[in-house]
Amino acid sequence: MKEKIYDIAIRYQGAISFVLVMFLLALGAGLSVANAQELPEGLKGENITIPVICGDTRVMYQELSETHGEVPVAIGFTTNDTAVVWFTNEERTTLSIVIDTPNRSCMLYTSRCLDGDCYMTPEENFNNQKDKMFPENDSPKVSL
């Protein structure tokens, strides 16, 4: 049983990393919203300690590029002059998530992935997974 779980975890390491990163980003966004408005019942704003690497944005980007071969592949902006930037290398085997503020950048997350798993466009993901979702002998049928 442990080996099966391990095999699944290894196979979907990129997806698991992506979900973890999105969870951390959602947590951060939730805390930001918590400070700005009244929260729904059952939620509360908290300040939590998360280890991050922070510094000058130019130094951060230069280090990711020159040392790790990572470049920005996705970016999202907020209304308070903050951006979330997803970096990956050309082989898509490493990734880093950076929060940019006007005065500095902080790396929230970094990981190694299985070959090609660190970043995929939705179209690439669909093309890689469509045979698993719709096997040739079990394709969905549409009748009119």
Image (cartoon, rainbow, N blue to C red):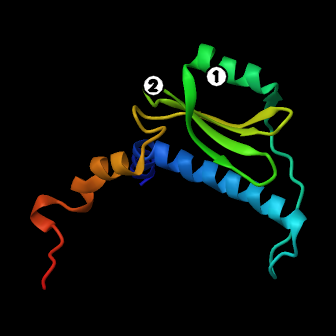
- What residue lies at 86% left-to-right and 70% top-to-bottom? 44
Between the C-alphas of marks 1 and 2, the distance is 12 Å
Q: Is residue 66 shown left or right of residue 28?
A: left
Q: Position of residue 29 (x, y in %)?
A: 75, 58
Disc 2: which residue: 90
Q: Position of residue 26 (x, y in %)?
A: 69, 58
Q: Residues within 10 Å of mark 1 (few under 14, many from 20)?
A: some
Residue 45, visible in the rendered structure: no
- In the rendered image, the quadrant that contains the C terminus is bottom left
When the figure is inspected, residue 65 is found, relative to residue 31, above or below; the finding is above
Indicate the quadrant where residue 92 lies.
Answer: top left
Question: Which residue extends farthest bottom?
Answer: 144
When the figure is inspected, residue 133 is found, relative to residue 20, above or below; the finding is below
Q: Earlier in the sequence, mark 1 or mark 2?
A: 1
Q: Is residue 35 shown left or right of residue 82?
A: right
Q: Residues within 10 Å of mark 2 (few under 14, many from 20)?
A: few
Disc 1: which residue: 64
Indicate the quadrant where residue 70 lies.
Answer: top right
Q: Position of residue 124 (x, y in %)?
A: 34, 45
| Depth order, front residue of 5/104 | 104
- In the rendered image, the quadrant that contains the N terminus is bottom left
Question: Which residue extends farthest top?
Answer: 66
Residue 125, visible in the rendered structure: yes
| Depth order, front residue of 40/137 | 40
Q: Secondary structure at mark 2?
A: loop
Amino acid type, mark 1: Leu
- What residue lies at 86% left-to-right and 47% top-to-bottom? 49
When the figure is inspected, residue 99 is found, relative to residue 57, above or below; the finding is below
- What residue lies at 48% left-to-right and 43% top-to-bottom? 14
Amino acid type, mark 2: Glu
Question: Residue 9 got which mark?
Answer: none
